Image (cartoon, rainbow, N blue to C red):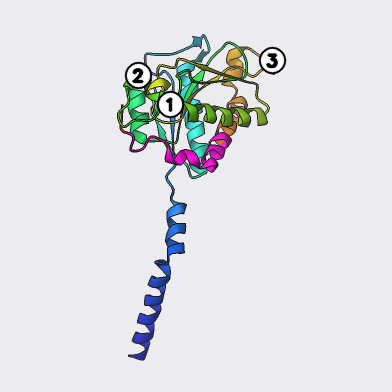
Amino acid sequence: MACGRMRGAVLALAAAAWCLPGRAQASSASVARFVVVLDAAHGGNDTGGHSSDWMEKNFTLALSVRLRSLLAARGIQVVTTRESDVTLDAQQRDEIANHANAQACVSLHGTLTGTGVHLFASSFTPAAQVRFVPWKTAQAAWVARSVALEGVVNSALQHAELAVTVGRTALPVVDSMTCPAIAVEVAPDRNATGTPAESLNDASYQARVADALAAAVVEWRSEGPHLDDSGAGAGQP
């Protein structure tokens, strides 16, 4: 009987300790939601840019798979618009991204022209968030955060000694996303000695770009404030 009473007291104390406010806050903070959407551009019957030995649709999918693995290893939840060689239109990609209520959306592209990595945010003028936003201009409510995300990615790429150009333009897919979103277009390495296709097919170059993008996402997650303005609860366009 005495042992039973002692065991009961110990369990009661353990339960009380678990319910202390500090413990509850720590537990809640440890599972803070952070989701990234990776959009591998093109696919299926849409090859994107191509040459005799390179296709953009294959390059973007390979980069998405590589980056997804790096982010998952860092405890980041990843949603991808495609995992195979399938055809998706812009609206399907946006529906996947907006349903995820993500804290960052990265649309991945490749090009045989130019060098380094080209970053683009939407050219929309920032607008206030509203509950129901127009589909084609949804990104306007998030564009200020998208420009901030672009800056974080730019810094990470430069830290990895990759050439970077930064700009803003009309982006049919990104412009309908309800989260901080940018397009990342990877061109051949500026120091490459082979053809543009050989540079983009180089696994070590792909790894450098993916590692830098993963580091940027981790830095973005650490900033914190964007967790409250990701678009969750703002309604779907």
Name the amino acid, label 2: Lys
Residue drawn at the location 42% of the way across and 31% of the way down: 179
Name the amino acid, label 3: Thr
Residue 103 seen from this side = yes
Q: Which residue is mark 2?
A: 136
Q: Residues within 10 Å of mark 1 (few under 14, many from 20)?
A: many
Residue range highlighted in magenta:
215-234
Across and down, in percent, residue 48 comes to 45, 13
Q: Which residue is mark 1?
A: 39
Residue 87 seen from this side = no
**Furthest residue toward bottom:** 2
Q: Main secondary structure of the magenta part?
A: helix
Q: Secondary structure at mark 2?
A: helix
Determine which quarter of the picture holds residue 88.
top left
Considering only order in the chain, which callout, 3 or 2, is on the residue closer to the N terminus? Answer: 2
Name the amino acid, label 1: Asp
